[in-house]
Structures are given as C-alpha cells and as structure tokens.
Image (cartoon, rainbow, N blue to C red):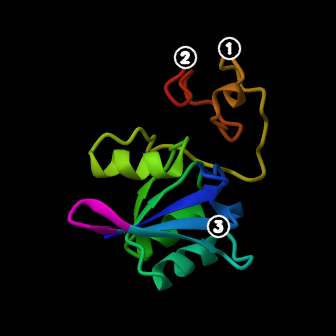
Amino acid sequence: MKIAVTYDNGQVFQHFGHTEQFKLYEIDGGKVASSQVVGTGGSGHGALAGFLQAHGVDTLICGGIGGGARNALAEAGIRLFPGASGSADAQVEALLAGQLQYDPDTVCAHHEHDHEHGHGHDCGHHGHDCGGHDHGGSCGGHN
C-alpha cells in the first residue's frame, strides 16, 4: 500500500489542484515503513492523478478537491479520503488505525471562493479551510 497526502509544511494541504508537494508513505504490515516528500513539478489538477499513479500511489488523503480531479483519481484506481486536515503524519496513522476523520463530500470549486458562508464561525481559525462552501454548518467537526 502506498498513501499520498497533499502536503504543506507538515500539514494536509487544503487545495488538491494547487498542491506543490505530496508526502508519500510506504505501508508494510499496517505500519509506515518509509516516507518522503516529493514535489509535483508544477503539475496541476487532472495531471496530479497521473503523477500519483506514476509513483505507485493507491490511496490519497487531502483537503478540498474538485470533481474533475475526483474523476481522474477514480480512473487511476486511487482511493480518495478528502476533507482531512491537520498533521499529515497523524492523518496517515489515523487512516491505518481506521479512525481517519474525513468528509467524503468535500469539494473544492476553484472559481467560487466565497469565504463568507454562514457557518457562524470562521473555519480558518480551526486550521480548516472549507474552500468557500456551505457544509450544512459542519466544518471539520466544529459547529
């Protein structure tokens, strides 16, 4: 198993199509055997699915992700866990333990970034960027 996480300074990066780095984790026997940070070389959006496939990735943990990228990942046979936030390493450990907090409905539409979206709080203060969408009052577990 090989897991990729959209990566920025130790954290899960929140915009898949704009990620400049992934942290790749080799999993052996249910544990992280090794990890490395790789740059995307400026690839974006749909091209990133091919980038991950070329690196042998079968699982992706990320923040927001658009529909086109979701389709490209599905075609590449890569399992997707969107809506994650926090430490990249901690998210991988949580996935391996079956305890990853993620939102399968998280979407990132890059042309609709209206950050005043009626949550009753600013999601950014919790280290989670909703990507400008209304999630029914729920943002990374904070109401």
> How many C-alpha atoms fall within 10 Å of the one at disc 3: few (<14), some, or many (≥20)?
many
Magenta residues: mostly which secondary structure?
Answer: strand
Residue 137 position by quadrant: top right
Q: Are marks 3 and 2 in contact (CB under 8 Å)?
A: no
- Residue 140: percent from the left, percent from the top? 53, 31
Secondary structure, mark 1, is loop
Secondary structure, mark 2, is loop
Secondary structure, mark 3, is strand
Between residue 72 and residue 102, name the one nearer to us.
102
At horizontal 36% and vertical 44% (from top left) the residue drawn is 94
Q: Is residue 29 magenta?
A: yes
**Residue placed under numbered mark 2 in the picture:** 143
When the figure is inspected, residue 52 is found, relative to residue 14, above or below; the finding is below
At horizontal 51% and vertical 76% (from top left) the residue drawn is 52
- Residue 47: percent from the left, percent from the top? 62, 78
Marks 3 and 2 sit apart, C-alpha to C-alpha, by: 30 Å
Tell me which label, 3 or 1, sits earlier in the chain: 3
Q: Are marks 1 and 2 in contact (CB under 8 Å)?
A: yes
In the image, taking residue 99 as reference, residue 17 lies left or right, namely right
Where does the magenta region start and end? 27-33
At horizontal 52% and vertical 51% (from top left) the residue drawn is 88
Tell me which label, 1 or 2, sits earlier in the chain: 1
When the figure is inspected, residue 126 is found, relative to residue 111, above or below; the finding is above
**Amino acid marked by disc 1:** Gly
**Amino acid marked by disc 3:** Gln
Mark 3 or mark 1: which is in front?
Answer: 3
Q: Quadrant of the C terminus?
A: top right
Marks 3 and 1 sit apart, C-alpha to C-alpha, by: 32 Å
**Residue placed under numbered mark 3 in the picture:** 21
- Residue 63: percent from the left, percent from the top? 57, 48
Per the rendering, the mark at residue 120 is 1
**Amino acid marked by disc 2:** Asn
